[in-house]
Image: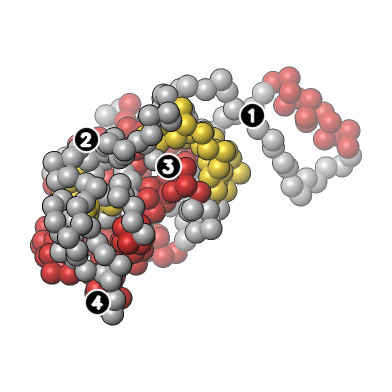
Amino acid sequence: AEADLPRALESFRLLCGDADCEVLRGFLSSVSEGDSDVSPIILSPDADKAHRLEVHDFFKRNFIFLVTDTVEHSDGVQRCIRVRLRSGPRGRRNRTGIGSSEPSGWRDDRPFDSRGSVTWPYHLGKFLRFHLYKENKDTQEALRVIGKMLGLQPRSFRIAGTKDKRAITTQQVTLFKVHASRLAALNNKLTGIKVGDFNYVKEGLVLGQLMGNRFTITLRSVIAESEDMIKVAVDGLIKNGFINYYGLQRFGSASVPTHLVGATLLRGEWRSAVSLILDPREGECDDMNGVREHYKEHGDIDVAIRNFPRRLIAERAILQRLKKYPGNYLQALMAIPRTLRLMY
């Protein structure tokens, strides 16, 4: 009955949190509207096997038209629960919130990332290309937010390069077999992120596939004795160039400078590199530094994983790997996604 659905969603929220609850709510809405080719959703990484079993059991008890399984996260370490429509007579959810006898658009044996491979229009390119606009967010964080709302893994997105965090930036992104309407519908829900200029192309982007970057730089609150002094400074900038701070540009000044981490890696000091990434740092909010201080003092990985926000991809990847391989700091560093690891 319809009254059962809000109760089930509230139970799920208490079990898995607000973010996963909103993803599930959107998924159920798509199915109830008759979307026969709705993509599976991926819940947040979950290292607790007992909790994952509880989530699987929840779906068996509350949503008989759905099937769940555990899949590997894109970092190759963490585990996530995938939710999709069940094949067969119980596969389609009706508008009352309980299963019905209509067939499902998803087969149990269908490859995970084959979105739309059966019904994708032949006249469209297989990749959706769009412009990503973001304010004061790094590229991976912005794509993680969008992926979460679409139920897609981060590896689904293809980009030519990473844009700075402390800036307003635009860049092209491609997605395999995703309809533009799904992304366009997110604009009212996104904060500091917008997507648009959609078109379908034959090939996805690859890293490095760009001619360059165009910048408009604004200097605020400039204090100088005269305009002539400012002109001399600008002329010197044009003639001599400037220092490229790379990591600080992309991740912000509250982040540990990536070149310091890189130096420890070159020296083979794996533990020191992990410490630089995990330890407290200046410029970060007190709550976040409290989490870092607690881990540094007590070494409690489970508490740290619970309290580190999901946007801190490197930190969470390291902790997940250390939980599996205690003391293996090189393995922990290798758990950081390659595109992010290259910044060091």
For the N terminus, give its image quadrant. Answer: bottom left
For the C terminus, give its image quadrant. Answer: top left
Name the mark nearer the viewer: 3 or 1: 3
What residue is drawn where x is 43% and y is 30%?
124
Q: Earlier in the sequence, mark 4 or mark 1?
A: 4
> At numbered mark 3, what does the secondary structure look like: helix, strand or loop?
loop
The alpha-carbon separation of the residues under discs 4 and 1 comes to 55 Å
Q: Earlier in the sequence, mark 2 or mark 3?
A: 3
Q: Is residue 75 visible?
A: no
Name the residue carrying label 2: 330
Name the mark nearer the viewer: 4 or 1: 4
Callout 3 crowding tier (Cα within 10 Å): few <14, some 14–19, many ≥20 = some
Q: Earlier in the sequence, mark 4 or mark 3?
A: 4
Disc 1 residue type? Arg
Q: Earlier in the sequence, mark 3 or mark 1?
A: 3
Callout 4 crowding tier (Cα within 10 Å): few <14, some 14–19, many ≥20 = few
Circle on res. 214:
1
> At numbered mark 4, what does the secondary structure look like: helix, strand or loop?
loop
Name the residue carrying label 3: 179
The alpha-carbon separation of the residues under discs 3 and 1 comes to 29 Å
Callout 1 crowding tier (Cα within 10 Å): few <14, some 14–19, many ≥20 = few
- Residue farthest bottom in this picture: 3
The alpha-carbon separation of the residues under discs 1 and 2 comes to 37 Å
User: Which quarter of the picture shows residue 249?
Assistant: top right
Disc 2 residue type? Leu
Name the mark nearer the viewer: 2 or 4: 4
Q: Earlier in the sequence, mark 1 or mark 2?
A: 1
